[in-house]
Image (cartoon, rainbow, N blue to C red):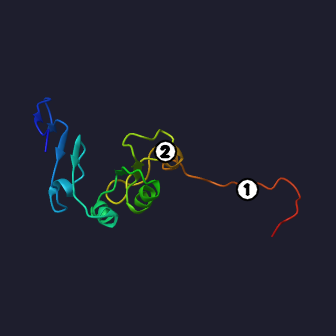
Amino acid sequence: MCGGEQLDLGQGQYIEPTLFGDVSSTMPIAREEIFGPVLAVMPFDNVEDAIRIANDTKYGLAASVWSKNIDKALTVARRVRAGRFRINTTLAGGPELPLGGFKQSGWGREAGMYGSEEYTQIKSIHVEIGKRDHWV
């Protein structure tokens, strides 16, 4: 629809911010995990159709939805299989929140309490230092 010009930055393949229209679920742009300033516009008929389209991928890093109806937006957020879901924004969050995807978009979590647990082995140590009443 707009954008898509190749940028020569000296290495790799780069394009300017691009909006792709009339995308179908069989197209590579809808099937691959693209890291870049692109948006693929896919038509849908109702909320159930939108959720089906969103989940019809082997990836699930992040997703977002825009709506004035917070109940409907939260229903979509609960049902879309993505590691990070945003409502009415794309750049919210902070270092205290876990980051990681579902399906083939990653293993484990980074950041926040869950991210630190990825690098931690928890151990319990029990020491009896005197006579006590046993609860069992």
Question: What residue is disc 2 on?
Answer: 97
Question: Where does residue 22 sit, x and y in percent of width and height?
Answer: 15, 55
> Residue 126 bears which disc, if any?
1
Q: Is residue 71 left or right of residue 45?
A: right
Question: In terms of depth relative to the viewer, which is nearer, 46 or 10?
Answer: 46
Q: Residue at x 46, y 53 (%)?
A: 70
Q: Is residue 48 left or right of residue 121?
A: left
Q: Is residue 84 left or right of residue 4?
A: right
Question: In terms of depth relative to the viewer, which is nearer, 61 or 23?
Answer: 23
59 above or below 91? below
Question: Where does residue 29 sit, x and y in percent of width and height?
Answer: 18, 53
86 above or below 6? below
The quadrant in which residue 10 appears is: top left
**Dot 2: what SS?**
loop
Front tag of 1 and 2: 2
Q: Amino acid at mark 2?
A: Leu
**Dot 1: what SS?**
loop
Q: Residue at x 37, y 53 (%)?
A: 101
In the orientation shown, which residue stands out farthest toward the bottom?
Answer: 136
